Amino acid sequence: MSNLYAIKVVDTCFDNSLSEDESYSLENLISGIKEVQSPVVTEDYIIFTANKNARFTGIAFDFEDYSKIHTFQRLITRDSEFEPIDSLLFYVCKIPEKIIDISYRLIIDGIWTYDPVNENKYYSYEADTYFSVVKIENQKKPKTEKLLPLETTPSLTGHTRFVYN
């Protein structure tokens, strides 16, 4: 039996101040990472994974104009005696609002490249290189329903009354 432990706190793309619920949610997502695979899209996050052999792995996104490199974290699998038996690299990105896909590049030991485990990529003739892409299909559903009045009724007191169903 093995246990998963993350070395460092997750660095999301936007905000390091996480609520208790967000921290718990991220811990559950991270504990579910078992192998290097294509990016996994959840309701709020995308989980990227990479091979453990690189000395440095980072990721840069199109919505930040590839100007910021986010560092992957190491996830270590340990045996029942807490001895390390394997590891992999991961990065968790909070999905920006109103985005339907994200293009990105990995930086592996200083070399900018596409994600070797993600089959979804495209070639940019302008940049003369490949970009990996993730489609965002689980768009967040609004937390509240927007209600509009069916009609307005003027009252004798000079106030307007809104009627909702």
Image (cartoon, helix red, strand yellow):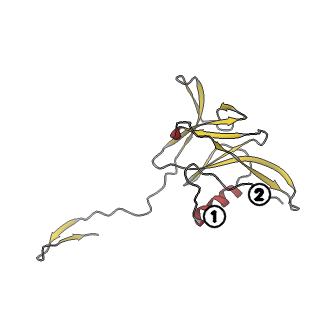
In the current view of this chain or complex, which residue is farthest to the left? 156
Q: Secondary structure at mark 1?
A: helix
The quarter in which the N terminus is drawn is bottom right
In the foreground, 61 or 151? 61
Is 22 placed above or below 98 here? below
User: Where in the figure is residue 44, as x and y percent of width and height?
Assistant: 55, 54
- Give the residue at x 60% y 26%: 129
Left or right of 30 in this view: 15: left
- Determine which residue is flagged by label 1: 24
Residue 78 position in % (x across, y down): 83, 56
Q: Report the residue marked by disc 2.
A: 4
Q: Report whether 99 appears left or right of 76.
A: left
Q: Is residue 110 left or right of residue 153?
A: right
Which labelled disc corresponds to residue 112? none
Check disc 2 and report its element: helix, strand or loop.
strand
In the figure, 25 relative to 107: above or below?
below
Residue 160 position, x and y percent, is 18, 70
Please tell me which residue is depicted at 60% across the width and 28% down the height of the picture: 130
What residue is drawn where x is 52% and y is 40%? 64
